[in-house]
Image (cartoon, grey):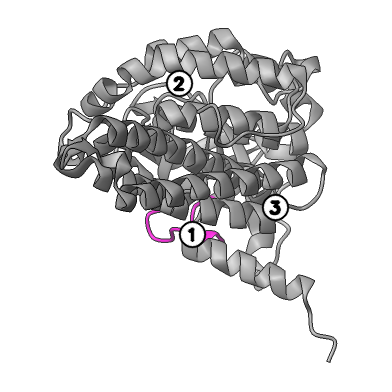
């Protein structure tokens, strides 16, 4: 869109990057997205194109071969990519969460070993917190790491692993009681392990199995999997940061980046839904005139556009806060909550504008209608966001009475 969701104060470099990504989306993603999505086909050609553009190194520091760009630049790129096809933004999101966690928390050896190859897209990242029985309750994880000589044995089952098959490096959160006596706070006995593996499905290294893709309603193309560890041996130098017991804090830091990403995805999908709705409303005629001339449709378009603008502004604010080095869990939670809810509403209004054709797989809005719900639960449900927001507000506005 020429008018909606503009971002003030961008540098010439940022504008050039965004223009390049937008052009790539229009030429390489939008023409093929719906066909690939209906086939649930991994978009290898698109991924190769993102590698050539240097997108896998966007936020990785220049000393490791990346572009060294800000979270804001990344979020705006994600917004553009999600406008084309949300699944593609998922392919790069987990990669960047792992790269960010390495940059912020990794040992020098870990940074030197992984980040240059991640910048090139040769090593592709995924991260794993959730388990079959816990959802958003991260403190209840049961996967276990036990020290065994100069390595650890990992056991347990993880769930909802985006890029589980295609990734070659997975940041896995497990419980490790070493140095943390029984009865200590659950979040203090968690450790993040950097698990290297072969891409694909089945047993991808001794003790590690990726069973196969989970069949989903939407968010297709990208592979979502389980991860099963059975005496998976990981050397001690693959503990993120070299110290056990820091995993919860490391993951939550990464999730703040992830929540800005999900907000950006919501913005991108909502923008595309608005584009489809406003275009269809000018093409479709009823009662002798385009339906865009009916006041009922104009009201819908006005509400949709306002939601697109509001969500974009909150997403940009959350990214700015993180880039400034400040804690942004409040802003990221608000942005993720608002953008995902507004995305759902804008997509539904575009669906209604399409009438019966919105239900047809020939029209792109059908795909968006199935994709939007994932944003309501990804990176923490709306209810979890509201809990985070509420707690942080009570911290900020603590009563003095």
Give the overall secondary structure of the magenta segment: loop
Q: In percent of the image, x 81 and y 49: which residue is there?
A: 326
382 lies above or below 306: below
Which of the pair 81/239 is nearer the observer? 81
> Which contiguous range is marked in magenta?
130-144
Extreme-front residue of the structure: 288
52 lies above or below 251: above
- Which residue in the protein does label 1 denote? 136
- Which residue in the protein does label 3 denote? 249
Residue 377 appears in the rendering: no
Residue 398 inside the magenta-drawn segment: no
How far is the residue under mark 1 from the one under mark 3? 15 Å
- Which residue in the protein does label 2 denote? 198
How far is the residue under mark 3 from the one under mark 2? 27 Å
Q: Nearer the viewer, mark 2 or mark 1?
A: 1
Q: In percent of the image, x 28 and y 25: which residue is there?
A: 34
């Amino acid at each position: 869109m020429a008018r909606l969701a503009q971002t003030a104060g961008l540098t010439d470099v940022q504008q050039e990057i965004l223009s390049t990504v937008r052009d790539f989306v229009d030429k390489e993603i939008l023409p093929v997205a719906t066909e690939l999505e209906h086939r649930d086909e991994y978009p290898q050609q698109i991924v190769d194109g993102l590698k050539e553009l240097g997108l896998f190194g966007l936020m990785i520091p220049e000393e490791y071969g990346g572009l060294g760009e800000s979270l804001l630049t990344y979020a705006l790129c994600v917004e553009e990519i999600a406008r084309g096809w949300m699944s593609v933004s998922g392919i790069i999101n987990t990669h960047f969460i792992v790269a960010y966690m390495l940059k912020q928390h990794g040992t020098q050896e870990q940074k030197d070993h992984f980040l240059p190859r991640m910048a090139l897209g040769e090593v592709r990242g995924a991260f794993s917190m959730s388990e079959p029985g816990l959802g958003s309750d991260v403190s209840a994880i049961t996967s276990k790491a036990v020290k065994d000589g100069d390595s650890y044995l990992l056991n347990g089952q993880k769930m909802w692993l985006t890029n589980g098959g295609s990734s070659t490096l997975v940041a896995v959160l497990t419980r490790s009681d070493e140095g943390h006596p029984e009865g200590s706070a659950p979040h203090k006995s968690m450790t993040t392990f950097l698990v290297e593996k072969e891409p694909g499905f089945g047993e991808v290294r001794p003790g590690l199995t990726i069973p196969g893709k989970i069949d989903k309603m939407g968010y297709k193309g990208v592979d979502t999997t389980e991860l099963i560890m059975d005496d998976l041996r990981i050397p001690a130098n693959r503990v993120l940061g070299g110290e056990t017991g820091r995993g919860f804090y490391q993951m939550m830091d990464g999730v703040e980046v992830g929540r800005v990403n999900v907000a950006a995805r919501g913005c991108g999908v909502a923008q595309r839904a608005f584009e489809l709705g406003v275009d269809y409303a000018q093409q479709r005629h009823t009662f002798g005139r385009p339906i865009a001339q009916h006041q009922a449709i104009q009201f819908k378009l006005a509400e949709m556009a306002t939601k697109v603008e509001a969500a974009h502004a909150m997403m940009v604010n959350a990214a700015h806060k993180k880039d400034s080095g400040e804690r942004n869990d409040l802003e990221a939670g608000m942005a993720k909550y608002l953008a995902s809810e507004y995305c759902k509403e804008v997509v539904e209004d575009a669906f209604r504008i399409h009438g019966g054709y919105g239900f047809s797989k020939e029209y792109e809005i059908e795909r968006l209608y199935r994709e939007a719900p994932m944003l309501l639960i990804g990176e923490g449900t709306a209810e979890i966001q509201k809990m985070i927001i509420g707690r942080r507000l009570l911290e900020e506005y603590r009563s003095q009475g």
